[in-house]
């Protein structure tokens, strides 16, 4: 069943290129336009949407944070992303022109389900992004865009996350197509780039041995910090979540710009800090600011573990460990930058003797509020 792998998680990490390709399949035509037939919300309704709210929990919430950046950039529709468990109980402002996107691998998460019921009662349209056919969340939604990751058995979500990102990019790009985007050329380029992503994920997977080695060398550490900015911030949060749930280590993700507002006080000699570096070709200001952050923490003794694009030479002098990822458009970078963090957490869990597929205290689908 595990296809020769020791754990389902390893198998599912390895399946990511296929999961990504399967989720794209049939949704982009050769001319580069998107067809999301399953989204039965008419284009006329999508043209009238004036606000988008993304709700989800855990890893799916991190996908939602990235979705917000993509949606707002490409469509200019105001979008917020909120934890389903917080959203439901704060009397959110919703109406018939609000599109709610509920992201859930299992389709059974109670917090997400309660949030979407609340949204529909207020008249909002709900689109589910889900990996499980016929589960409760898509059944109760107005429309569904299925991710085609295949069954995910390991409790820690990996391939579902990458496909949730793909689905969110497709929704954002589809909205841009239906409504027009001031970034028309960029939208066309990104649609093209999406078809190259599965190969890039494959390339990342082929270069993971040094990451595994690094993880094993950190097995007796107590704390690992993660820093990122823009799309790298949710990736940092995701890296920290994986490490908590699998390695039972204290792991925290921060927005790199917040460092000086508090977290930098945590930096001490030999503390491992993972930094997700944005593409130097995209928002170069962000890139340069992160490079200064790496310098700052290294000057205070941190052991820097830097995830940066191939060809990004600016980070080299400050990286104690350098993990390379293929050059990818800024908003799509999480598809490649998350993968080393999954491998890192899985290997650390193994090195610490933990049960990888079935971490303590956790269940695959959380059907209580
Ligand atoms: C983390 C993880 C959880 C789930 C969360 C939502 O690896 O698996 O954080 O992402 O419980 O689950 P779904 O997506 O099924 O709603």
Image: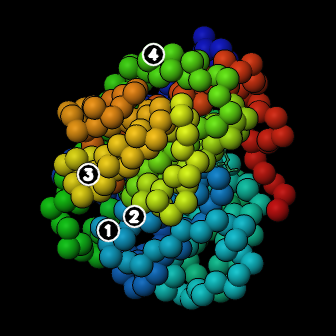
Q: Is residue 307 left or right of residue 242?
A: left
- Badge 3 is on which residue? 288
Q: Which mark is residue 69?
A: 2
Is the C terminus in the top left, top right, bottom left or bottom right quadrant? bottom right
Residue at the spot 34% in from the left edge and 25% down from the top edge: 203
Is the N terminus in the top left, top right, bottom left or bottom right quadrant? top right
Q: Is residue 32 left or right of residue 34?
A: left
> Looking at the image, do the residues carrying marks 1 and 2 touch, with CB atoms under 8 Å apart?
yes
Looking at the image, tell me whether mark 3 or mark 2 is earlier in sequence order.
2
Looking at the image, tell me whether mark 2 or mark 4 is earlier in sequence order.
2
Q: Which mark is residue 73?
A: 1
Residue at the spot 66% in from the left edge and 57% down from the top edge: 57
Q: Secondary structure at mark 4?
A: helix
Distance (Cα) linking label 3 and label 2: 20 Å
Badge 1 crowding class, 10 Å Cα cut-off, few under 14, some 14 to 19, many 20 or more, is: some
Q: Secondary structure at mark 1?
A: helix
> Looking at the image, do the residues carrying marks 2 and 4 touch, with CB atoms under 8 Å apart?
no
């Amino acid at each position: 069943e595990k296809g020769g792998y020791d754990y389902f998680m390893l198998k599912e990490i390895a399946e990511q290129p296929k999961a990504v390709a399967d989720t794209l399949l049939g949704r982009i035509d050769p001319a580069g336009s998107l067809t999301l037939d399953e989204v039965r919300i008419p284009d006329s309704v999508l043209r009238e949407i004036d606000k988008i709210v993304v709700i989800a929990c855990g890893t799916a919430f991190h996908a939602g944070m990235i979705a917000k950046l993509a949606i707002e950039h490409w469509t200019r529709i105001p979008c917020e992303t909120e934890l389903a468990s917080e959203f439901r109980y704060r009397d959110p402002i919703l109406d018939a022109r609000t599109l709610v996107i509920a992201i859930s691998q299992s389709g059974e998460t109670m917090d997400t389900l309660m949030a979407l019921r609340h949204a529909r009662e207020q008249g909002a349209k709900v689109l589910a992004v889900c990996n499980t056919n016929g589960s409760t969340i898509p059944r109760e939604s107005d429309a569904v865009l299925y991710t085609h990751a295949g069954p995910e058995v390991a409790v820690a979500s990996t391939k579902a996350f990458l496909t949730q990102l793909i689905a969110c990019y497709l929704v954002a790009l589809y909205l841009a197509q239906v409504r027009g985007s001031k970034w028309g050329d960029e939208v066309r380029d990104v649609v093209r780039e999406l078809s190259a992503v599965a190969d890039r994920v494959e390339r990342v997977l082929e270069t993971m041995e040094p990451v595994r080695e690094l993880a094993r060398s950190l097995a007796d550490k107590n704390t690992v910090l993660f820093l990122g900015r823009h799309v790298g911030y949710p990736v940092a949060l995701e890296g920290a979540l994986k490490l908590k749930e699998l390695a039972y280590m204290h792991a925290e993700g921060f927005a790199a710009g917040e460092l000086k507002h508090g977290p930098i006080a945590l930096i001490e000699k030999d503390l491992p800090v993972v930094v997700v570096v944005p593409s130097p070709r995209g928002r170069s200001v962000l890139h340069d600011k992160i490079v200064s952050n790496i310098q700052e923490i290294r000057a205070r003794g941190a052991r820097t573990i830097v995830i940066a694009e191939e060809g990004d030479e600016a980070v080299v002098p400050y990286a104690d460990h350098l993990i390379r990822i293929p050059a990818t458009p800024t908003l799509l970078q999480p598809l490649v930058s998350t993968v080393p963090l999954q491998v890192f957490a899985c290997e650390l869990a193994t090195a610490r003797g933990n049960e990888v597929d079935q971490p303590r205290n956790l269940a695959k689908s959380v059907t209580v509020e």
